[in-house]
Amino acid sequence: MRRKPRTLIVMVKEPRPGRVKTRLGAEIGMTRAAWWFRHRIRYLLRRLRDPRWHLVLAVSPDVDGLQSRVWPGDLPRIPQGTGHLGHRMLRAMAAAPPGPVCLIGADIPDVTSTEIAHAFRMMGTADAVLGPAEDGGYWLIGFRSSALAARALRTGALDRVRWSTPHAMADTVAVLPGLKIAEAARLADVDTKADLTRRARSA
């Protein structure tokens, strides 16, 4: 039996000062933070090109993101649209072709294809997968099929998640009852100057 195609969606914002990495920007300057974000995400996208999945960008703002020259022109793009973070994530995954779908944000710049491949493999026995972040949120969410993501979207499954808090991952697990959820690798975000310094020391 032919394996259904895998889809990896990366959510990206136009790297404008004051629109991305604002917590980092408050400490090092908004222009420097936007520059750092832009170049790290370019490296990230380069690393995540892999024949094992289709790579898609979910862009924001919608119109500017679809027309932007910042991101590689050959990668397909979809608009994030309106709504809270959970709604936008589920809508993007629900629109993917039949088969496993994972979505990541652009806030953890050192994700590699190894972590992504591991997450997809976990869905061989699980319905969904979450990649925990050090701050209580998560850097990856995936479903065994885009149909499962569409069902979660229809039922408003992520409407009650407390986003941008230490409770985001626990809330997500709680609002996906009946699904077997696997846990991928734990990774660290870069939100502050201290995070940036710690990352540089460990490089």
Image: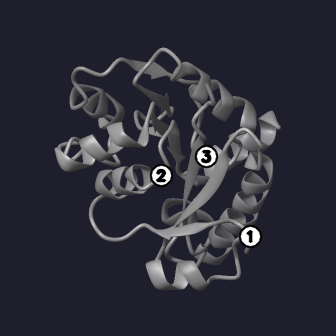
Number of numbered labels in the structure image: 3
> SS for tag 3?
loop
Residue 123 percent coordinates (x, y): 51, 23
Amino acid type, mark 2 = Ala
Residue 74 bears which disc, if any? 1
| N-terminal label among 3 and 2 | 2
Residue type, label 3 = Ile
Q: Residue at x 57, y 75 (%)?
A: 14
> Gap in Å between the C-alphas at discs 1 and 2?
17 Å
Going from N to C along the chain, the mark reached first, 1 or 2, is 1
Residue at image position (73%, 55%) is: 45
- Kindly indicate the quadrant of the structure image that contains residue 117: top right
Query: Dot 2, crowdedness within 10 Å: few (<14), some or many (≥20)?
Result: many
> Is 192 left or right of 165, judged from the image as shown?
right
Q: Residue at x 35, y 58 (%)?
A: 88
> Which residue is more in the foreground, 200 or 134?
134
- Please identify the quadrant where the N terminus is shown: top right
| Residue, far front | 1
**Eyeballing the image, is 28 above or below 129?**
below
Q: CA distance from mark 3 to mark 2?
A: 23 Å
Whole-percent x and y of residue 196? 68, 49
Q: Which mark is residue 108?
A: 3
